[in-house]
Image (spheres, rainbow, N blue to C red):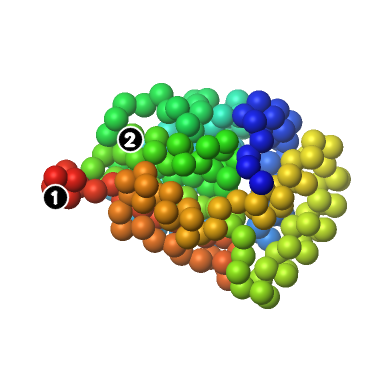
C-alpha cells in the first residue's frame, strides 16, 4: 500500500511519539539496536564528517552516529518526535542538531553532507523515490546513504514468524498504549506488506544516481540495510 498523505502520517506518529521507543523495541524483538550499529559500521564515517539522519524519530540512530564523533543533524516530518530526541541527546551529552523537514524537500544545500541515514522511515514517505533523489542531491561526491527498512520477507520461515508477530501480537501490545488508539501499529504491518521489494528499492536507488549499491539481509531478512554511494566527480565525468 502507498504511504498515507503526509498530514495523516504526521498526526498518527505525533500521537505515538511518547511510546515510540518502547514500541520500536517490541516491533523488532529488541534487535533494532544491533541493526543500527551495523548501519553505523557500514557507513564508516570519519570523525567530524557531516551526517543527516532523516526520518530520525526520537533520535536513536542519529545518537549512535554522534557517539563516533560524527557531526549529526536529525530531521523528521513529525514535530513531536524532535523534543524527545533533543532530551535524549542532552542526557547523553551528545552534540546534535534537530529540525523538522520533509524528506521530499530537504532544506539543505547540494553536496553538503558526507552521509545520510534513514531507519524505518522511508516506507512512510509519500514518494520514496523523490526522497532518494533528495538524499543524492545533498550528498557530496563519494558520500554514502544507509537505509534500514522492513521489506516483504521472502524466507518462508521468517516470513511466517514475522507476519504472525506483526499482524497478531504487536497490535495487541500496542493496544495497551496510546499507540493502539491511533491505528499506527495496524497501519505498520500493512505498510510493510505493500512496500517495495528489495530489488525494486535498489532500482530506485540506481535511478536516483547511487552506485555501489548493497542489499544486506539482517536477522534472516526481517530487516534490510540498503547502501549506496554517490559517484566521485571523476566517475560522473566518465
When the figure is inspected, residue 138 is found, relative to residue 150, above or below; the finding is above
Residue 138 on image: x %, y %: 33, 34
Element type at mark 1:
loop
Residue at the location (66% across, 26% down)? 7
Q: Residue at x 84, y 37 (%)?
A: 181
Q: Position of residue 98 (x, y in %)?
A: 49, 28
Q: Tell which of 134 and 147 is nearer to you.
A: 134
Mark yes or no: residue 53 visible: no
Q: Which mark is residue 238?
A: 1
- Please state which of residues 41 and 213 is positioned toward the viewer in this rendering: 213
Name the residue tied to disc 2.
137
C-alpha span from label 2 to label 1? 19 Å
| Residue 178 drawn at (x, y percent) | 81, 37
Asked if residue 209 lies left or right of residue 65, the reply is left
Residue at image point 23% right, 43% down = 141
Earlier along the polypeptide chain: callout 2 or callout 1? 2
Say how many tags the image has.
Answer: 2
Of the pair 47 and 224, the residue shown nearer to us: 224
Amino acid at each position: 500500500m502507498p504511504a498515507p498523505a503526509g498530514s495523516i502520517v504526521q498526526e498518527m506518529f505525533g500521537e505515538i511519539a511518547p511510546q515510540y521507543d518502547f514500541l520500536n523495541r517490541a516491533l523488532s524483538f529488541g534487535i533494532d539496536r544491533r541493526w543500527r550499529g551495523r548501519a553505523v559500521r557500514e557507513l564508516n564515517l570519519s570523525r567530524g564528517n557531516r551526517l543527516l539522519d532523516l526520518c530520525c524519530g526520537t533520535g536513536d540512530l542519529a545518537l549512535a552516529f554522534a557517539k563516533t564523533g560524527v557531526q549529526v543533524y536529525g530531521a523528521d516530518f513529525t514535530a513531536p518526535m524532535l523534543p524527545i530526541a533533543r532530551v535524549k541527546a542532552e542526557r547523553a551529552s551528545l552534540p546534535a542538531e534537530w529540525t523538522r523537514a520533509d524528506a521530499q524537500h530537504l532544506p539543505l544545500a547540494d553536496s553538503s553532507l558526507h552521509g545520510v541515514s534513514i531507519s524505518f522511515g522511508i516506507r512512510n514517505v509519500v514518494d520514496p523515490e523523490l526522497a532518494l533523489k533528495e538524499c543524492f542531491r545533498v550528498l557530496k561526491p563519494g558520500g554514502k546513504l544507509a537505509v534500514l527498512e522492513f521489506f516483504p520477507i521472502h524466507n518462508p520461515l521468517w516470513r511466517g514468524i514475522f507476519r504472525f508477530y506483526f499482524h497478531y501480537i504487536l497490535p495487541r501490545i500496542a493496544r495497551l498504549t496510546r499507540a493502539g488508539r491511533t491505528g499506527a501499529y495496524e497501519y505498520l504491518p500493512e505498510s510493510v506488506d505493500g512496500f517495495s521489494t528489495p530489488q525494486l528499492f535498489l532500482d530506485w536507488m540506481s535511478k536516483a544516481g547511487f552506485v555501489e549499491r548493497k542489499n544486506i539481509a539482517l536477522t534472516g531478512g526481517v530487516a534490510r540495510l540498503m547502501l549506496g554511494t554517490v559517484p566521485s566527480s571523476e566517475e560522473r565525468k566518465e
